[in-house]
Image (cartoon, rainbow, N blue to C red):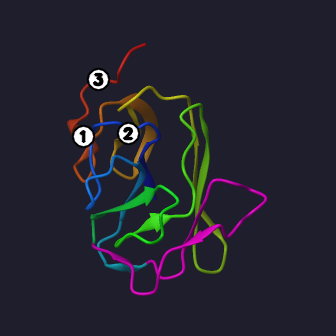
């Protein structure tokens, strides 16, 4: 599932090249490794298969996976061919057959705020400080405007 999203990352967490890019955190609710080869992330309903995860992409049981949303497929790792609008937009996760697995409507976010589920993989989303690759149960309070 989509577990956490950041659309205005200016200094919260850097990718492997030291760049502060938008990101999407996926979480595996199950007790088995899931092969995400050719699964889809899209920020545009009119382009339903916008970014396909590469073959061999797997997520461990109860594990996290970060996809950088920076339009920079030349970098190593998972870099989607879209960015996330800080003024808000939607993100969909689909399986390799194009079936909808998860969808989130992201509100406008300030710099270095994330939109995360209160509990990993389930529950409502809240605007908060980022918990990238960490349990969201560490989120004690959502960030207030």
Q: Mark 3 points at which residue?
A: 141
137 to 72, vertically: above or below: above
Q: Does the magenta stretch include residue 45?
A: yes
Residues 15 and 123: in front is 15
Residue 129, image x and y in percent?
30, 31
Left or right of residue 34, residue 50 in this image? right
Of the residues tagged 1 and 2, which is closer to the observer? 2
Q: Which mark is residue 117?
A: none
Tell me residue 119's x, y (percent).
Answer: 33, 43
Q: What element carries label 3?
A: loop
Q: Position of residue 81 (x, y in %)?
A: 56, 63
Q: Residue at x 45, y 77 (%)?
A: 36
The residue drawn where x is 27% and y is 71% is 61
Q: Is 76 placed left or right of 102 in the picture?
A: left
Give the residue at mark 2. Answer: 9
Which comes sooner in the sequence, label 3 or label 2? 2
Whether the magenta-drawn stretch holds residue 92 is answered as no
- Of residue 17 and residue 101, the one placed in the foreground of this image is 17
Instruction: Provide the major secondary structure of the magenta segment.
Output: loop
Depicted 81 relative to depicted 117: above or below: below
Q: Which residue is drawn at 39% across and 86% down?
A: 56
Classify 10 Å Cα crowding around label 2: few (below 14), some (14-19), many (20 and above): many
Please report the bounds of the magenta region as a residue range: 36-60
Q: Using the rendered view, name the quadrant where residue 136 is placed.
A: top left
- Residue at which label 1 appears: 137
């Amino acid at each position: 599932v989509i577990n956490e999203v950041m659309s205005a990352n200016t200094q919260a967490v850097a990718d492997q090249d030291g760049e502060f890019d938008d990101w999407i955190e996926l979480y595996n609710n199950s007790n088995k490794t899931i092969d995400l080869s050719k699964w889809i992330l899209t920020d545009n309903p009119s382009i339903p298969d916008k970014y396909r995860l590469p073959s061999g992409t797997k997520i461990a049981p109860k594990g996290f996976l970060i996809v950088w949303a920076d339009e920079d497929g030349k970098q190593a790792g998972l870099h989607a061919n879209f960015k996330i609008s800080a003024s808000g937009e939607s993100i969909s996760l689909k399986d390799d057959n194009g079936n909808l697995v998860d969808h989130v409507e992201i509100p406008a976010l300030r710099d270095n705020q994330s939109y995360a589920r209160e509990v990993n993989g389930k529950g409502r989303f809240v605007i908060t400080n980022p918990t990238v690759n960490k349990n969201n149960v560490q989120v004690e309070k959502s960030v207030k405007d």
